Image: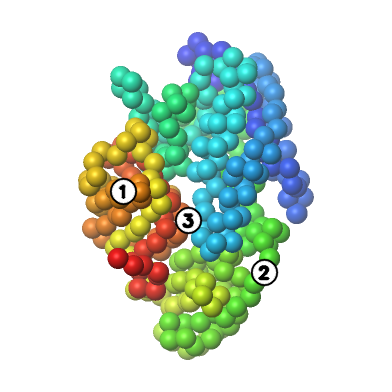
């Protein structure tokens, strides 16, 4: 609607990227496709559905499963934006003669000379630049984010006033294109269980876990330790996944010391501009979505990986998750967390 009002000529294309039905009923993508068709009809614009499920499976979901098997906790939405929305789907858009791809991300782009910058969305509670940090200059040049200058309440009001059919639809959450599913039961459809001991930091066995891929650092729910009367009486949290003996290490207290790290090591980093600002520089960073920006220093290694040192210790910085860098509103890029200097983590100088 915003593009129409700006005198543009949009075509609506729905990406059907998931073939497997929800175990409890209809695939949420089918519902979303019908809603998208209703919106296109209401606006009087062309609408089509394109099936990119093979691309999603091969380029996103296989990686998602492989990371879990390796004991890490991946973020498929980040890879989906790079490999599907702004790659496979970009090819579809070009086939339709499109000059740009407009999506509903709460983010902004700024074109400064030959450089295209990725900026945070105006709504701090909905900003999605974190999930777009792997885009390169070519992909960003295709991108338009019409909602980037708006806050969510304004979007709702505009949609309601225009009587758009999905004006009251609740926000989408969960795994990209798969929808809201309980994480462990979903993963158990694809990964084998490998039970092992659940132990405290002194090595005392407290129970049995269902498999290290089904847990993540800082996790509280699903441990089955609510009845444990020993210790401080505080809730139990996942502190470490020890692959050497398939043990899940847990401890009591949301601020258990073993959850905190002051330094992270990443895999090869990606800079949106195409190059690092310097071999060593200061900036802000997020180790998870919606985290307040954290002051840090970044050292770029010869192999392109980063060593990042934080002014304040970070809680549950998780291997497999994205470490995303910022300078003010500008997203500089990001990398995948490989290790931390948390007390129980594998870390070497």
**In the rendered image, which residue does mark 1 sit on?**
302
Q: What element does badge 2 sit on?
A: loop
Question: Where's residue 42, x and y in %?
Answer: 66, 21
- Left or right: 257, with 164 as reference point: left
Determine if residue 20 is in view.
yes
Query: Is 20 drawn above or below residue 52 in the view shown?
Result: below
Q: What element does badge 1 sit on?
A: loop
Residue 192 bears which disc, if any?
A: none
Q: Do the residues labelled 2 and 3 touch (CB within 8 Å)?
A: no
Way the structure is coloured? rainbow
Q: Residue, x 69% and y 58% (percent of image)?
A: 190
Q: First in sequence, mark 1 or 3: give its number.
A: 1
Graded by Cα atoms within 10 Å as few (under 14), some (14 to 19) or many (20 or more), the crowding at tag 3 reads many
The one of 273 and 255 positioned closer to us in this rendering:
273
Query: Is 251 drawn above or below residue 75 in the view shown?
Result: below
Q: Residue, x 56% and y 13% (percent of image)?
A: 9
Query: Is 348 drawn above or below residue 224 in the view shown?
Result: above
Q: First in sequence, mark 2 or 1: give its number.
A: 2
Q: Residue, x 60% and y 29% (percent of image)?
A: 89
Q: Do the residues labelled 2 and 1 touch (CB within 8 Å)?
A: no
Q: Marks 2 and 1, Cα distance to the nearest angstrom? A: 39 Å
Query: Is 28 drawn above or below residue 161 in the view shown?
Result: below
Graded by Cα atoms within 10 Å as few (under 14), some (14 to 19) or many (20 or more), the crowding at tag 2 reads some
**In the rendered image, which residue does mark 3 sit on?**
320
The one of 206 and 59 positioned closer to us in this rendering:
59
Question: Where's residue 262, x and y in %?
Answer: 29, 63
Quadrant where the N terminus is found in the figure? top right
**In the rendered image, which residue does mark 2 sit on?**
193
Q: Do the residues labelled 1 and 3 touch (CB within 8 Å)?
A: no
Question: Where's residue 29, x and y in %?
Answer: 69, 40
Q: What element does badge 3 sit on?
A: loop
């Amino acid at each position: 609607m915003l593009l129409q009002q700006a005198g543009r000529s949009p075509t609506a294309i729905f990406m059907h990227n998931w073939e497997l039905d929800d175990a409890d009923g209809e695939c949420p993508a089918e519902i979303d496709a019908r809603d998208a068709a209703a919106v296109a009809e209401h606006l009087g614009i062309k609408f089509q559905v394109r099936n990119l499920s093979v691309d999603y499976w091969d380029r996103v979901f296989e990686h998602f499963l492989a990371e879990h098997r390796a004991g890490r906790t991946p973020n498929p939405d980040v890879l989906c934006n790079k490999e599907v929305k702004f790659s496979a789907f970009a090819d579809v858009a070009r086939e339709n003669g499109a000059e740009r791809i407009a999506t509903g991300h709460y983010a902004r782009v700024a074109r400064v000379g030959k450089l295209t910058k990725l900026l945070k969305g105006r709504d701090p509670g909905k900003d999605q630049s974190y999930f777009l940090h792997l885009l390169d200059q070519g992909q960003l040049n295709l991108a338009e984010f019409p909602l980037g200058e708006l806050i969510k309440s304004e979007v709702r009001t505009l949609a309601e006033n225009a009587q758009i059919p999905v004006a009251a639809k609740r926000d989408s959450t969960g795994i990209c294109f798969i929808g809201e599913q309980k994480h462990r039961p979903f993963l158990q459809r694809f990964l084998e269980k490998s039970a092992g001991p659940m132990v405290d930091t002194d090595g005392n066995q407290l129970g049995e876990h269902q498999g290290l891929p089904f847990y993540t650092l800082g996790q509280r729910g699903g441990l089955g330790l609510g009845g444990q009367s020993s210790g401080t009486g505080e809730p139990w949290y996942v502190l470490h996944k020890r692959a050497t003996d398939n043990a899940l290490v847990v401890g009591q207290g949301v601020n258990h010391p073993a959850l905190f790290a002051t330094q992270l090591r990443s895999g090869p980093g990606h800079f949106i501009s195409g190059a690092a600002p310097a071999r060593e520089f200061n900036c802000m960073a997020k180790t998870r979505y919606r985290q307040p920006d954290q002051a840090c220093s970044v050292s770029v290694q010869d192999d392109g990986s980063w060593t990042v040192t934080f002014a304040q210790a970070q809680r549950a910085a998780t291997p497999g998750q994205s470490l995303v860098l910022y300078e003010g509103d500008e997203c500089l890029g990001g990398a995948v967390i490989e290790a931390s200097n948390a007390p129980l983590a594998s870390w070497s100088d």
